[in-house]
């Protein structure tokens, strides 16, 4: 199954926020696409993207440790539509 990750929307948000360091948090089923997502975002923004390799159990599962990394923006990708 293929998912619409709305990467153009993500790229627009990163550019609008002028984020230098972006952390991407992925549900386990999406982790195999991490490098592709990272590359596309870095190619279309001025940001450096890091991938959160820890668990992700939904939108409420925010990795508090990323604050210590000094990220400007945390982007969470999951399998369900979130409005």
Image (spheres, rainbow, N blue to C red):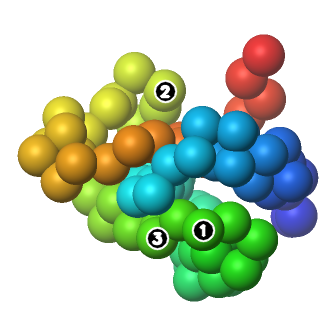
Quarter of the N terminus within the rendering: bottom right
On the image, numbered disc 1 is attached to which residue?
Answer: 46
Q: Secondary structure at mark 2?
A: loop
Residue drawn at (78%, 29%), measured in percent from left and top? Answer: 81
Instruction: Residue 58: tell me if it is visible.
Output: yes
Name the residue at 32% across, 32% down: 62
User: Residue 72 location in percent, x, y?
Assistant: 39, 43
Q: Quadrant of the C terminus?
A: top right
How much space separates mark 3 and mark 2, taking CA atoms?
A: 22 Å
Q: Which residue is disc 2 drawn over?
A: 59
Element marked by disc 3: strand
Between residue 68 and residue 6, name the one nearer to us: 68
Label 3 belongs to which residue? 48
Residue 76 against residue 50 in the figure, above or below:
above
Q: Residues within 10 Å of mark 3 (few under 14, many from 20)?
A: some
Distance between mark 1 and mark 3 Cα atoms = 7 Å
Q: Nearer the viewer, mark 3 or mark 2?
A: 3
Q: Position of residue 25 (x, y in %)?
A: 45, 52
Q: Nearer the viewer, residue 3 or 20?
A: 20
Residue shown at the point (47%, 68%) measured from the top left: 49
Quadrant in which residue 52 is drawn = bottom left
């Amino acid at each position: 199954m293929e998912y619409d990750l709305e990467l153009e929307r993500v790229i627009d948000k990163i550019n609008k926020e002028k984020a230098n360091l972006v952390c991407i948090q992925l549900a386990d089923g999406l982790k195999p696409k991490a490098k592709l997502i990272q590359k596309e975002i870095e190619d279309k923004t001025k940001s450096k993207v890091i991938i959160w390799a820890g668990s992700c159990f939904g939108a409420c599962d925010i990795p508090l440790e990323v604050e210590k990394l000094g990220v400007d923006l945390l982007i969470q990708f999951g399998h369900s539509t979130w409005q």
